[in-house]
Amino acid sequence: MDNSTVLYAIPLTGVLALLYALFKASWISKQPEGTEKMSTIAGHIADGAIAFLKREYKVLVIFVASVAVLLAFANSGREGTSPIIAVSFVVGAFCSALAGYFGMRVATKANVRTTHAARTGLGEALNIAFSGGLVMGLSVVGLGIIGLSGLFIIYSQMFTDMAEVINLISGFSLGASSIALFARVGGGIYTKAADVGADLAGKVYEGIPEDDPRNPATIADNVGDNVGDVAGMGADLFESYVGSIIGTMVLGAAFIPVFNSIGFPNPIAAVMLPLVLAAVGILVSIAGSFLVKVKEGGNPQTGLNMGEFGASIVMAVLSYFLITAYLPASWTAEGIVYSSLNVFYAVIIGLAAGVMIGLITEYYCSTDKAPVIGIARQSITGAATTIIAGLGVGMMSTALPVLVLAAAIVASHYFAGLYGIAIAALGMLSVTGIQLAVDAYGPISDNAGGIAEMAGLPAEVRERTDKLDAVGNTTAAIGKGFAIGSAALTALALFAAYRQQAHITSLDIAEPIIMAGLLIGAMLPFVFSAMAMGAVGRAASDMINEVGRQFREIPGLREGTAPAEFAHCVDISTKAAIREMILPGLMGVLVPVVVGFISKDMLGGLLAGVTSSGVLMAIFQSNAGGAWDNAKKRIEGKIEFDGVVYGKGSDTHKAAVVGDTVGDPLKDTSGPSLNILMKLIAVVALVIAPLL
C-alpha cells in the first residue's frame, strides 16, 4: 500500500468511529425510559446540562475568535509561519467542543435508560451505560483523527516545507487545549459546587440522603456529573490524544533528511506513524467494545477490564507489525542509532506505564484496600483526623506513579531518544476510544442511581445501580491515572518539540534566567489550584444557602409534599462556573506568552517547572479526593472496627462526608485541570516558538 493510500485511509477510520458512535446513540435512544417520573427527572438533568454547555460555548466563541485573530496577525509576514494557523486553532476548538456536545447529549439519554434497565437486570444496564460512554470515546478519537489528518492532507498540498506544515497543525492542538481547560475548569466548578452543596446541605445539615428528591441541589449535582466527568474528561483526553500525536509528528520531522539520505521510499514515515497508530487504535477500540459484557450476578468490573485491557493487548501486538513494516530497520540521526524495533519497545513502555499507573491509582482509591480503610478508621475520631489521613494518603500516592513515569521516560528515551518519549505517550493513548468509554460509563451509572433514588424505585434497583456506580468509581480512578500519566508524557513530548522548534540545544538550570522560569513554572499549579478550589468554595456556599432557604420558605418541602425549586440551584452552579473559569484559563494562555517573549530559555525552564510540580499536584489531589470519596462509601455500606459497626447517619459517617467534601474539588476540579494546564502551556510554547 503506497503512502498516499495510507494517508487518505486514516481519516476514514475517524469517519467509521463517528458512524459507529451514531449507531450506538440511535440504539440508546430507542431503549425505554421507564416511568413518567423517571422521564421528568432525566429531562431536568438533560435540560440543565445542555443549558450549561450553551452558556459556556457562548463565552468560548468570543475567546476562540479573539485568539484566532491574534494568531493570524502574529503569524503574518513571517518566514516559516502563516496566518492559516488560526484556521487550525478554530478547527481544533470546534472539534473538541463538538465531541463534548455529542458525548453529553448521549450521556443524558443513557442515564435514565440505564436506570430502567436496572429494574430487570444488571447486564442490560451495563450495556446501556457503557454504550453511552462509548459514544463519548469514539466521538473524541473520531473527530481528533479526522481533524488532524484532514489538515495534514490539505497543508501538505499547500506547502512543501514539512516543518511549516506541522507548525500549522500545532494550532489544532492549541484549539483543543483551550477548550479543554475551560471545559474542565468550568465543568469541574459546576459539578463540585453542586456536589458539595448537595452533600453538606443534605447529609450533614438537613439529615437527608444526597439524592433525596427533597434536596433542591440533586438535579444540579446530577447535571454536574455530565458537564464535569463526561464533557470535561472528554475534552481532557481529546487534548492529550491530539497533543501526543502532534508532539510525535514534530519530532519525527527531524528524521526526514536522514530517511532521504538512506534512500528510504517514505521519508515522512516517522511523521505519519502516530497518525497510523491512532487510526488502528480506533479500530481496536471498536473491536474491544464487543468484549464488554456481564451476566446477572456477575462483576461489571470484569467485563470492562476485558474490553479495556483486551484492546491494549491487541494494540500492542498490532503495533509491532505496523512499526516494523512502516519504519526503516535502522537509521542514525545526530549520533544516535534508531531502529523500528526500538520504537516498538517505546510504544510498549507507554502502554505498560499507563496500565501500571492506573492500577496504582486503583489501589489508593479502592474501597477494599488499606489506604481507604485506614481513612475510614480515622473517621471514628472526627473530621480532622479524616482530613489528615486523606492528605497523607494523597501525598504518599505520588511516589509509585512518579517512579513509573521516571522509568518510562528513561527507558523510552534509551530505546528511541526524544521520539521514543513522544511515541510512548501515544502508546499510552492509542486505545483512547475504549479507555474514555470505560471512564465516561462512571458518571452515567452515578446518574442512574440518582434517578432511581429520586424516582422512588425499589431497593433492588438502587442496589444494581450502586454496583455499577461502585465499579464506575474504580474505572474513574484508573482513568484519572491514565489521564495524569499521559499528560506528563505528552507535556514532555511537547516540551521536546518546543526545544526543537525554538532551536534550544540544552537548558542549564544554573543560569539565573532558567532557574527563574523553573520556579515560576513550579508555582503555577499551586496558584491555579487555589483559583479553582476558591471558586468551588464560593459557589458551594451559595448553594448551601439556597438549599437552606428553600427548606425554610417552601411549606411542605421537608415532608415531601411540595416540589423543590431545582432551577435555582442549577442557575447558581452555571453562573459560578462561567464566571470563575475565565481567570484560570487566561493564566494558562498568557503566562507562557509573556515569559517566552522575555526569554525563550526562560520559557523552557517554565515548562520544566510546571510539568514537574503539575504532575505531583495532580496525582496528590486526584488520589486524596478519590480515597476520601470511597472511604465515605465504605462507611455507607457499613464497616466494622473493633466489634463496632459504623454506617449511614453515624458521627463517623458525617466525618467521612466532610472528608469527601474537602476532596471533591481536589479530585474533580483542580486535580484533573492540572493535566490540561501542563499541556496547554506546552502547546502555547510550541505554537509561539517560531515567533521567538
Image: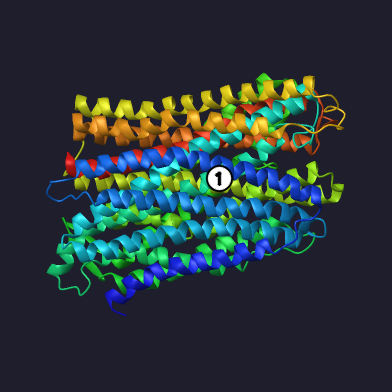
| Nearer to me, 57 or 577 | 57
Figure quadrant of the C terminus: top left
Q: With respect to residue 590, does 385 lie above or below? A: above
Can I make out residue 508 in this image? no
Q: Quadrant of residue 377?
A: top right
Residue at 33% across / 32% down in the picture? 609
Image x and y of residue 551, in percent: 78, 23
Q: With respect to residue 40, does 384 lie above or below? A: above
Q: How many marks on residues?
A: 1
Label 1: state its secondary structure.
helix
Circle 1 is placed at which residue position?
Answer: 360
Under mark 1, the amino acid is Ile
Residue at 23% across / 64% down in the picture? 156
| Nearer to me, 555 or 67 | 555
Q: With respect to residue 143, does 470 lie above or below? A: above
Q: Quadrant of residue 630?
A: top right
| Nearer to me, 77 or 253 | 77
* Relative side of 8 to 107, left or right: left
Figure quadrant of the N terminus: bottom left
Residue at 26% across / 71% down in the picture? 329
Image x and y of residue 624, in percent: 58, 33
Can I make out residue 544 in this image? yes
